[in-house]
Image (cartoon, grey):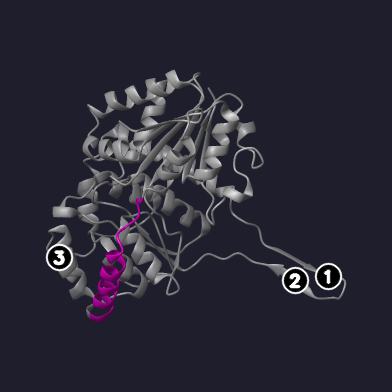
Amino acid sequence: MPHVLDTSEPGFESRFAAFLAAGREAAADVGAAVAGIIADVRARGDAALIELTARFDRLELTPETLAFTPEEIAAEVAKVAPEDRAALEEAAARIRAYHERQVPQDAGWTDKAGATLGWRWTPVDAAGLYVPGGLASYPSSVLMNAIPARVAGVGRLVICAPTPGGRANPLVLLAAQIAGVGTIYRIGGAQAVVAMAYGTETIAPVDKITGPGNAFVAEAKRQVFGQVGIDMIAGPSEVLVIADADNDPDWVALDLLSQAEHDESAQAILITPDAAFGQAVAAAVEKRLETLERRAIAGAAWRAHGAVIVTRDLAEAAELSDRIAPEHLELQRRSATMWAAPTTCCPPRARRASPPASRCSTS
């Protein structure tokens, strides 16, 4: 069972504080291990990559086989069902249309003193995209990293995606093809980040590295920052859903599990003013766990780090959300757009350097 908290009960504040303080970050020795990998890859290049891939991914490679060949990509892509291809193509089109609206505009003017001022936006020359391939493998990560880069005009895009035991994910390769990424290296972990940052005999360095990964990948991005740009240093995945009783408990359960399945340190939280609805969602999660492919991981995350928090009203739910400042925030209630206003849901005191991604769902 997840943590169950109620703001009206005595001792809520202490229990809530303990819940927030529970450690989910990587162990301290991760930093030292990653520093060693960085030194090794910088010193030995391809040889270190090959050795580390054999050790961690049980895959024997050579410099010539670090990247998938066009023929290998075509063979894997051919395995994708037509309906899955259609779903990826639709997602790609929607992502592209969204980010085309974000392209910043150049500007220039001459001020009263006669000085010419302005700004100009230009893309980086090359970007490296990390795509998880260990505990979880997500073609969505390919689309959401590669397509904005293409829209921005980045000239060279490469992907590093681990293939444990040599098993590639056809959906990941298809997503790369749809997004226009031709070079895909079958390496992962901290060593892949180092290779993209500093380069090896086979892999050319890039200007910026993006994409999610495990604790070692996140730590590697932290340590190579400065040599290259990065998107962010992400901790364990987390989602917070604020929902009222005018929702389908099963839909909310699916949203919670979509993050809980990432890894055992992931956090999924429901905040609702309706205790019965909270119980219904918890029951729906348990039912979904019976058939979920990644139920062992999702179940462990839900039991250790999941929570159902019952509040007096939705205003109090928003206040608790501000204190948590989650990575992903979903508002599933009527007039959700109004509630998403910065002064209502996410005041400046709760914002992080990288603001939480929010999705508003109306009932």
The residue at the far front in this view is 10
- 225 vs 69, left or right, is right
Q: Residue at x 34, y 66 (%)?
A: 220
The reply to whether the magenta stretch includes residue 48 is no
Instruction: Compare marks 1 and 2 and give the one earlier in the sequence.
Output: 1
Circle 3 residue: 61
Q: Which residues are magenta?
A: 23-43
Instruction: Compare marks 3 and 2 and give the one earlier in the sequence.
Output: 3
Distance (Cα) linking label 1 and label 2:
7 Å
As drawn, 296 above or below 206: above
69 and 300: which is toward the camera: 300
The answer to which quarter of the image holds residue 67 is bottom left
For disc 3, the neighbor class at 10 Å (few under 14, some 14 to 19, many from 20) is: some
Circle 1 residue: 111
Badge 1 marks a residue whose secondary structure is loop
Can residue 86 be seen by looking at this rendering? no
The reply to whether the magenta stretch includes residue 27 is yes
The answer to which quarter of the image holds residue 214 is bottom left
Marks 1/2 in contact by CB < 8 Å: the verdict is yes
Where is residue 293? Give x, y as percent: 22, 34
Q: Residue at x 26, y 61 (%)?
A: 189
Q: Residue at x 60, y 39 (%)?
A: 345
Marks 3/2 in contact by CB < 8 Å: the verdict is no
Circle 2 residue: 117
Badge 2 marks a residue whose secondary structure is strand
Disc 3 residue type?
Leu
Instruction: Compare marks 3 and 1 and give the one earlier in the sequence.
Output: 3
Secondary structure mostly seen in the magenta stretch: helix
Disc 2 residue type?
Leu
